[in-house]
């Protein structure tokens, strides 16, 4: 019976590792998409500026608007990732106390 307990903990730790990898992948995907969109819009503004279709003032104002539009979304992505890390820490605490973890499909649900 004592041999089953470490195997159980190892499978629970593996479940947490897979969930942590999932959280990190989602965070990286969302952050990459947001930063790519931010840089893409700045490049569009820069292209318009170099073609003399807009003035420097419009370029700077547009850059500020793009930043203001993307900053809250990026902050949200970072906060949700940190809450996922807190959840992972809670799962690790449960393992230390020998409490059962939820099913893998239920780990993402809060």
Image (spheres, helix red, strand yellow):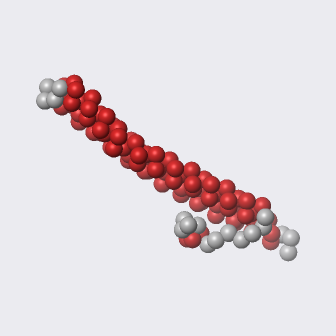
Q: Position of residue 107 (x, y in %)?
A: 58, 67
Image height of 91 relative to 41, above or below: below
Q: Is residue 21 in view?
A: no
Q: State the image quarter where residue 2 is shown.
A: bottom right
Is residue 25 toward the left or the right of residue 55 in the image?
Answer: right
Asked if residue 55 shows in the view, the reply is yes
Q: Classify residue 88 as left or right of residue 3.
A: left
Q: Quadrant of the C terminus?
A: bottom right
Position of the N terminus, as image quadrant, is bottom right
* Residue that appears at 35% across and 40% down: 68
Q: Relative to 62, is 94 on the left or the right? A: right
| Relative height, residue 89 to residue 67 (above, below) | below
Residue located 71% across and 59% down the image: 92
Task: Give residue 17's position: percent from left, percent from top.
Answer: 63, 57
Q: Nearer the viewer, residue 14 or 61?
A: 61
List the single residue furthest toward the bottom.
Answer: 1
Residue 104 image offset from top left, x and y in percent: 59, 69
């Amino acid at each position: 019976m004592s041999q089953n307990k470490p195997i159980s903990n190892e499978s629970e730790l593996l479940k947490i590792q897979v969930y942590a990898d999932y959280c990190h992948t989602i965070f990286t995907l969302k952050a990459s998409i947001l930063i790519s969109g931010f840089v893409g819009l700045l490049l569009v503004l820069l292209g318009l500026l170099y073609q003399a279709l807009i003035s420097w003032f419009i370029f700077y104002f547009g850059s500020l608007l793009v930043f203001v539009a993307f900053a809250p979304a990026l902050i949200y992505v970072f906060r949700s990732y940190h809450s996922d890390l807190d959840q992972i820490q809670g799962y690790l605490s449960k393992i230390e106390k020998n409490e059962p973890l939820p099913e893998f499909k239920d780990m993402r649900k809060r």
